[in-house]
Image (cartoon, helix red, strand yellow):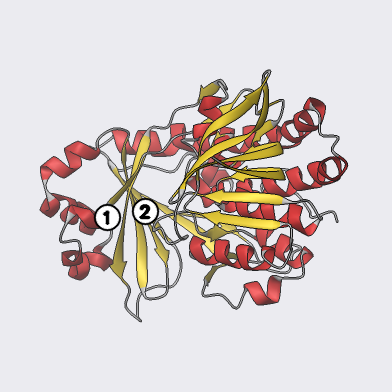
Amino acid sequence: MTEIKTTCCVAGGGPAGMMLGFLLAREGVPVVVLEKHEDFLRDFRGDTVHPSTLEMMHELGLLDEFLKLPHSTVRELSLQIGDDHLVVGHFEHLPVHCKFVALMPQWDFLEFIADHARHYSGFDLRMRTEATDLLLDEGRVTGVRATTPDGPIEIRADLTVACDGRHSTLRERAGFSVKDLRAPMDVMWFRISRNDNDPSEVVARVESGRMLVMLNRSDYWQCAYVIPKGTADEVKHAGLDKFRNSVGDISPLLRDRLHQIDSWDKVKLLTVEVDRLRRWYRTGLICIGDAAHAMSPIGGVGINLAVQDAVAAANILAEPLRRGTVTVDTLKAVQQRREFPTRVTQRLQIIMQNNLIGPALASKDKRPRAPWFMKLMQWPLLQRIPGRLLAFGVRPEHVHA
């Protein structure tokens, strides 16, 4: 079996894994990043790049180049709940270089980071390479076993970082305990063409038993149809016509284009999970990003939380990795740094789920009304609070070196 030796092995080439690999290589740490797919081209992954992530791009000196990638901008987020129209976030007042959310395909984001990481000799990205198990030596994680088109390989590393998503193989192999926070919903994603005279802003509507979010992707709408947890089979069994009619009822704008959904193959199901590990690390291994905490799609914060995990991890781990002095306490410091922002963010998502989305999806007989706390946030000064939370998250990270 082929064996590779490195300082750090990162399993998973998503936002957390790719950003961590880039930052460690930039700090002179040899790093191998494993990505199981042959490319980054996968639809309906998180693509909302918030001001906090854009500010990191500025700190890295990459912002101007980054903004040349295809993207659209969102400067204000609003939500229609029955008859109540609410502004849930605007960004013009923020003390940052980019006062907007950038909607950018995740594959462009990841390829951009990978291209810049390749400038460093210590960066080794291996596509079509999937981590399948941990290598152990007297209880210490010493690397991973992986599959490749050419056969199995072993990557020996001083530290392994699991960034392999919400269904992480490595966190399961490590025996980590997961706290399930539950979500009352799943999401059905699909595309609908966009006309030149369509509105440019994000469209989000909540009606009796239904919710639809439409993201402007220039020439098409990326649509999220929110359904009660576990009801996808019921929706499909009722047929495409009923599904299209339901979408048209909540968004009349799309009625003349819904024939484009001519097969269930064009509708992708996201099973929403909200969970987090009680402990993110053990000797030789740490989980970050979705592998440590699966987020709800509410607010589109997942990619940004993952990137902030990566920045915090790089800030804490780079020097110990260079010196070969990573200890359990070093890994504990990463969790201590990132656990509080994760808990607060998930708590806010759960409040939204339990007080808005869950009741709206459960009630099919009367129109929903906005919760009192959301109406309170419409006061001009208070209106800045949700915008700032969406833009920065809790305890935003900065690139140190």
**Could you classify mark 1 by the number of other residues whose Cα lies within 10 Å: few (under 14), some (14-19), or many (20 or more)?**
some
**Could you classify mark 2 by the number of other residues whose Cα lies within 10 Å: few (under 14), some (14-19), or many (20 or more)?**
many
Q: Position of residue 326 (x, y in %)?
A: 81, 34
Q: Position of residue 111 (x, y in %)?
A: 56, 65
Lower sequence index among marks 1 and 2: 2
Q: Nearer the viewer, residue 256 or 85?
A: 256
Q: What is the three-letter code of the residue carrying label 2?
A: Arg
Count the labels in the image.
Answer: 2
Q: Position of residue 70 (x, y in %)?
A: 51, 75
On the question of residue 161 being in view, the answer is yes
Q: Secondary structure at mark 1?
A: helix
Residue at horizontal 75 percent and vertical 32 percent from the top? 331
The residue carrying mark 1 is 250
Residue at horizontal 56 percent and vertical 61 percent from the top? 110
Proximity of marks 1 and 2: CB atoms separated by less than 8 Å: yes
Distance between the alpha carbons at the discs numbered 1 and 2: 7 Å
On the question of residue 102 being in view, the answer is no
Q: Residue furthest top?
A: 138
Image position of 127 with respect to 1: above or below: below
Q: Is residue 247 left or right of residue 135?
A: left
Q: Nearer the viewer, residue 156 or 117?
A: 156
Q: Is residue 289 left or right of residue 246?
A: right
Q: Quadrant of residue 236?
A: top left
Dot label at residue 205: 2
Q: Nearer the viewer, residue 12 or 369?
A: 12
Q: Secondary structure at mark 2?
A: strand
Residue at horizontal 71 percent and vertical 70 percent from the top? 62
Which quadrant would the N terminus be assigned to in this image? top right
Q: What is the three-letter code of the residue carrying label 1?
A: Ile
